[in-house]
Image (tube, rainbow, N blue to C red):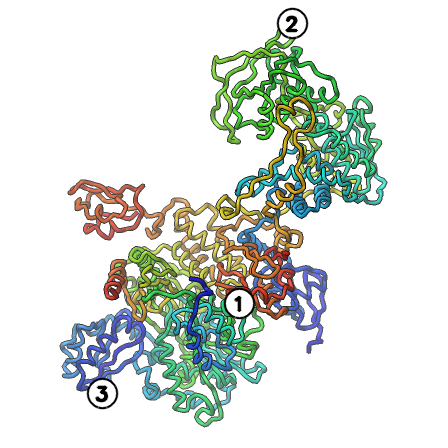
Amino acid sequence: MKLVFGEGSCGIAAGARKVRAAVEKLNAEGAVEVGITGCIGMCYLEPIVDVYDGGTLVKRLVKVQEKDAERIYKAAASGDLSGVKDLEISADDKEFLEKQTRIALRHCGLIDPEDIAAYEAVDGYKAIRKVLTMTPEDVIAEIKVSGLAGRGGAGFPTWFKWNAARNAKGDQKYLICNADEGDPGAFMDRAVIESDPHSLIEGMLIAAYAIGATKAFVYVRAEYPLAIVRLEKALAAAKKAGLLGENILGSGFSCDIRIKAGAGAFVCGEETALIESLEGNRGMPRLKPPFPAEKGYTQAPSNINNVETFANVAWIILNGGAAFAAMGTETSKGTKVFALTGKIKRGGLVEIPMGLTLRDVIFGIGGGIRDGGTFKAVQMGGPSGGCIPEHLLDTLIDYKALGATGAIMGSGGMVVMDSHTCMVNMARFFLDFTAKESCGKCVHCRIGTKRMHEILTRITEGKGREGDVELLQELCNGIKAGALCGLGQTAPNPVLTTIRYFRDEYDAHIREARCPAHECAALKKFEIDPAKCKGCTMCAKKCPVGAISGEPKKPHAIDQSKCIKCGQCVATCKFGAVEVK
Amino acid sequence: MCANCEKSDLSLLTPVFEAFAGDDHALISILQKAQDIYGYLPTDVLYAIADKTGNSPAKVMGVATFYTQFRLKPVGKNLILLCKGTACHVNGADSIEKALVEELGVGDGETTDDGLFSVKTVACLGCCSLSPVMMINEDTYGSLTPAKAKDIVRKIREASK
Amino acid sequence: MDTELIDLIIDDVPVRVPAGTTIFEAAKTAGIEIPNLCYLKELGPYGACGVCVVEVENCPKMLRACSAKVAPGMVVHTKSEKALATRKLALELLMGDHDGDCQGPCKLNCPAHTDCQKYVKEIAEGRFADAVATIKETFPLPAAIGRVCPHPCEKACRRNLVEEPISIAQLKYFAADQVRKDGNEHPIKVAAPTGKKVGIVGGGPAGLTAAFKLAQRGHAVTVYDQMPEMGGMLRYGIPEYRLPKAILKAETDAIAALGVTFVNDFKIGRDADFAKFRSWFDAVVVANGAWKSTAMRVKGEELQGVWGGIDFLRAVVTGEKPDIGERVAIVGGGNTAMDACRTAVRVGAKEVFVVYRRTRKEMPAEDIEITEAEEEGVKFKFLYAPDEILGKDGKVCGMRLQVMELGEPDERGRRKPVPVAGKFEEIALDSVIAAIGQRNDPEGFADLPQTQKGTIAADEGNFSTALPGVFACGDTVNKGAGIAIGAIAQANEAALAVDAYLRGGEYKPVKPILSERELSEKDFADRPRIARAKMPQRPPEERRNDFKEVNLGLSPEVAQAEAKRCLECGCHDFEDCKLIRYANLLQADVKRLRGDYHPGFVEQKLVTIERNQRKCVLCNLCVRVCAEQAKQGLLGLVGRGFKTVIKPEFQNPGATAVCKDCHLCADNCPTGALKVIG
């Protein structure tokens, strides 16, 4: 039997390597085969170990711990899996995968990402072989048929960009993969690179062939060290196999792919800032036009796509654009990967055909809100996106439909929030992010996001003023119109959508100095319910400022003038007597 | 510490310059390698890089201060990267940060007096399902609570005594 | 291809330009200015400021005119509602983050906006004639006003936050005295005659200033005054020991030398009625002041030996030798009360009291005046109010005083005096001088509508009255008596209005939009303390016996050293600053979007350039010209986002020498962030 450990970043963080090391220690004689794979996307169940028998998955063990290593090993060595029954994935959790349709993630968690043969065994590098027999125009035409659109956020038709780069004049053209996955809450690109790097390479080779590029870069964010390591290995293997470099597979087509590690700047997800960064400069966006297709890296025609976009390309070539286009809606074709996180029961990577509803994803696949909470909103599109409320949960996953809510499809971050999340504080959080990540070049973004953050901060501190919401709206519209790049132009979206759907929360903060979600510390009020308080004195002992007093065995009380709202009393009380108001 | 007093062993940069010879666009990569070597980017190293790459010191400094990855000061023995991504935010990253400040007495971008810990908040570590998350050196710690975070730091401190 | 011509419409104007032209350059060919802060043609577009945004029909996004290229049939609106709003927001954001003073607080707090910082600097540099010329850009009486002005400029002086304000007023009259002594005053330029005649009623600070300004603009001006000499209250209300008549005379003579005709001993209503007077001129300025003392409204006010403050002072000046006896009480706490009490000492009174109903702290008189009066032996009776003037045989023999105490603060924060019930005190006196205020005399001006106070009603902006061609300013209008420089400020506006009227137009002043810093002592904690210059004075026991000037004047050395204390708050680049020009153009609210400021510092790392990062708008032009035009690359952006600053990277001491000193950076800075020094 073979034990395959899910070793994406999440799995490793959850302890997969420790478990594997323990198993390998027991397996000195090699009674079982041990392998690794990437991320299956069920992050909430990590670490995950798949048990294979002769190439067939016979059992999936979840949330395995170091202490389970021995019985896992024994079960695999003996072939008797009854000893690990309790670790087996539940039927409910199986649904998480069964309800998905995986194209971009088709190999993730199923093959060894560090083994090119494993990729080739699942039809890997067949698409590039096919493409090398086609004309570039035919390749672009096939992509056009598929309706594939940029998965990084903007949703621009991929074929159009390829075509523009193909038609641009220039001796040297560049292909760039944007793997600077900066949206907090999105990690599908990392998962693809860590789990299936060859599909990215193959997608890029096809694109390079189509546009006539002979040099390519993958711009990976520095925070993804594992992705960089796996991609480096994959590139070396591909090169060795003649799939990369000069005269690929004897076709006369040459293309080299290099990795460039980002250095920590969200704005480098913006095409022109990314190019500046590739050139070794400060990542400050350039004016558009000229677009990169015309003047990109070193002023040469360049095409930039994101990882997930490339990950679909080989599948489309092999299965035909029509098969891809058969999925989805009128305006959005194929599938999309979402990173489902937040207060969700089953969080992880979800790939579904376009056209499902948000409810399908959050409740159908994600299992709804965890810990018995109530759904309040889902944040989509990260700092450029917006918060979608409960009553719009039946919105179709489609570029146009999501755009109409004020949010965006974005790169696929889907952060679920429950009733304990303050929407004003959420907006503040995002503006804190964009203000910190603003490159500082243009006035509207540099100073505008800073001012918005200041206003939102004062609202969450109970110092909001009448008219602040209108001022925010005015700033939002002005920044959208005036900012130089996408970062600034979309930075107001989290504010606009929270005002649009949760105006009452803003008003409660400003007019009543009240945070309805009880999240904003400055507006919290801690009170002890005398009916529940047993007078155990624990809270009084724990209180760092001595704000709680009372005689033993009698109900205690909190002196509001002393209370610093640290919440230690709530955490300490065993009787749930401290209420947050 | 005075910037002019820094005396780094610049010979360590030679292989880096060799590796990127002829690449006019490698400034960021060179800075990354230099930081790997020195742990941070000392001023004399930045000047040496400017000199070798034909960039002005002003440009090198501009790049080095633009990206959050680069440090112009030495960091503590243990670098704590605290994730402040959206999922972590929703799941209480602020309370973890508060706990770390309480435990270490330093905040974002600061180093403890004993040089054991530096704290840095980061936008997203990409381990959203384990939120709230922090990374100390190479290890990731997930599903944190304020108490758990303090405990982890204490254990590392004990171990390094 | 490049020679192809493109037709487009910009602001309804058809424009034809070669393909590849930007909207910005295309608009320029049609004479349409699109504001911008970060564009320089030679460097190409950069796109940071967002001030050049324009709207193009059928284009959902705003375009930056500096970079967007023209296209056939394009319809561009550079002033559409959305373009203006977006542009205005950029300016409001910039101004809210712009920690700089357009003008010094001294200049702003001077009612006439005299350019104090400029003449103080000229004095510091020993350019005294230039300093006088600077002052005379605002008014013609520097020696006189320097001596009498309660100097609101000094109250606003930022040096107050360090230790003491610059002696702006004393410096002013130092310069005037010095230039008069040296005989090197720059000639005043007078425009070619316009053939228009202006009659001015009143030869005080307001009338003389209006005359000076209108004469410079080529009008034929005649000033009429009821008194035998020109100068108004400066001559008849200010005692000789503060402002010698000869010095005032020299300055009024200089006005006459510009061609202004002076007619004295002439009073409207007595020598000509106002309607007739008007008919002699194309325009008239009424600036006849406030020459009536305010009554105390207490019993016994009609007694012999009761004087009005200004009446008493005038009598002394005209040589009437008023008989005030040995024991004199002056009622009031203002500067006129101080002038009256010190004059009383000088005309021989043995005991002089000042009766004031509040305490010294609340006295409106200048502190130095009070001190000097005390030195000269004046006694102060605080917290007393006159209740009744006591008489014997129709003459003053004493005064009963009501004892007061301070009650609740009024709306201005001054604690109100309230009588202590039943507590009175009596003092024996020979005379009482009521220096509690003064008002205008509307007699002879019945044609002019009045305010409820009985003053002449004039427009607060251009000082026109209800009668066409008649303007009125100074103590005689609206709120009534104030300080001389306030009357001068009004006269300046009135002069502009008269000039515009005579040229067939109308003058409407606009309040300029300015950037002002808000600072506290903290901001100056590291400034070295330098004591304010001390004015040498004659000793009290000597000066109390005569009317010779008390102050001996500053020496040139002391004056220059004093002037060098100036912090130079106002921006050197105010006249050329694009930022403030656009802020005014678009009526930007400069304070609305204030918040934290970006990191600010002032440094002199470049050879002759001082860099004030507080005023930087990050247009990046300095960085770009240094790298691309000067080929030096000394400057760079440091940091990211809101905290970005521009710095030269000079860790290496002595590296400053690499700056070529070409000044291209400073020349291209759209604000006053870069200043050429040395």
Residue A545 visible in rendering: yes
Count residues near mark 2 (Cα–Cα under 10 Å), then give few for <14, some for 14-19, many for 20+: few
Q: Mark on residue C393?
A: 2
Along the line of sight, the residue nearer the viewer: B18 or C111: B18
Residue at image location 79% in from the left, 29% down from the top = C224
Q: Horizontal placement of C224 versus A474: left or right? A: right
Whole-percent x, y for residue A216 in the image: 47, 81
Q: Quadrant of residue C35?
A: bottom right
Q: Amino acid at mark 2?
A: Asp
Query: Same chain, marks 1 and 3?
Result: no
- Looking at the rendered image, the quarter that the N terminus of chain A falls into is bottom left
* Count of numbered labels shown in the rendering: 3
Residue linked to disc 3: A54
Residue linked to disc 1: B58
Foreground mark, 2 or 3, reads 2
Count residues near mark 1 (Cα–Cα under 10 Å), then give few for <14, some for 14-19, many for 20+: many
Along the line of sight, the residue nearer the viewer: B104 or B86: B104
Q: Amino acid at mark 1?
A: Ala
CA distance for labels 2 and 3: 136 Å
In which chain is the residue bearing label 2?
Answer: C
Q: Amino acid at mark 3?
A: Gly
Along the line of sight, the residue nearer the viewer: C443 or A389: C443
Query: Same chain, marks 2 and 3?
Result: no
In which chain is the residue bearing label 3?
Answer: A
Q: Quadrant of residue A497?
A: bottom left
Residue at image location 63% in from the left, 13% down from the top = C326
Considering only vertical position in the picture, is A288 above or below A543? below
Do the numbered discs 1 and 2 sit on residues whose CB atoms are within 8 Å?
A: no
Secondary structure at badge 3 equals loop
Secondary structure at badge 1 equals helix
Q: Quadrant of residue A311?
A: bottom left
Q: Residue furthest top?
A: C393
